Image (spheres, rainbow, N blue to C red):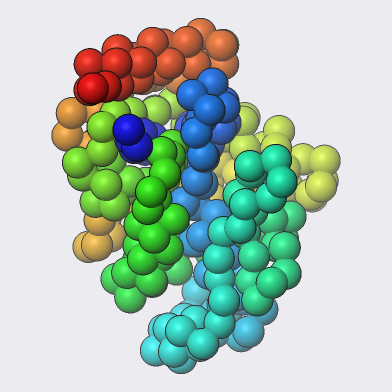
Amino acid sequence: MNYIVTIDGPSSSGKSTLAKLLAKKLSISHIDSGSIYRAVTLYALENKFLSNKKILLEKLVKSLSNSDISLKENSNGIFKMYINNEDVEDKIRGSRVSKHVSEVAKYEEIREFVLRIQRDISTNRSIVMDGRDIGSFVFPNADVKFYIDASIKTRSERRYNQLKEKEQHLSIREVENDLLNRDNIDKTRKKSPLIIPKNSLIINNVNRTIDDVLNQMLEYTNSIINKKMP
């Protein structure tokens, strides 16, 4: 039996880390949907469709339809992001992309483009997918749903620690302001805004260890899936 687990929440709440670990525990695939939006943002930046928060949307959408933006599974069962057969995993994780990704992701045309990739990759497999609208819009009938939240202080510290080695010029205040801006865009966009999905288990990921939260998620998932097993 194939099944879908969705994990939603704001940026840097810890959902991607938990999604990877949960998928590994369940021996199923993990899909980071945010990486697709990051790849589209990188593509827009590198091809001059985006500058100073101005986006040439029509030209970008047309160009995307003639390009290959895809997730490919490696020999270890890990999905990585590719643009025209180039591995862009490292490129999409920097602050340059992070600053613009919510701005790009708010457009309906972009979300429809990403939606096709998200749903195609889930065909005939069990997955854990994390993002901002996975349980509410992409897979509203998912078997198991989580919403991971955390304080802006916790999220800022987490994101700053991820970036500080590669981008030493960044301050934690800059990171916090960027996260607050992304929150505002994510929660107020017209197409599939960030909300708590119906029937999701809400987890406050503050002052808790990864193992503690992971065990809670694993126990909850197994309790639901075991009931559905024939």
Q: Looking at the picture, does residue 136 appear above or below residue 64? A: above
Q: Residue furthest front?
A: 230
Horizontal side, residue 187 vs residue 114: left or right: left
Q: Residue at x 46, y 84 (%)?
A: 65
Q: Visible in this render: residue 185?
A: no
Question: Percent x, y for residue 128?
Answer: 43, 37
Question: Percent x, y for residue 74?
Answer: 69, 50
**Quarter of the figure that contains the N terminus:** top left
Along the line of sight, the residue nearer the viewer: 84 or 12: 84
Q: Looking at the picture, does residue 140 appear above or below residue 81? A: above
Q: Visible in this render: residue 216?
A: yes
Question: Percent x, y for residue 7?
Answer: 38, 35
Horizontal side, residue 181 vs residue 115: left or right: right
Q: Residue at x 49, y 52 (%)?
A: 34
Horizontal side, residue 169 vs residue 223: left or right: right
Q: Residue at x 29, y 52 (%)?
A: 138
Horizontal side, residue 59 vs residue 44: left or right: left
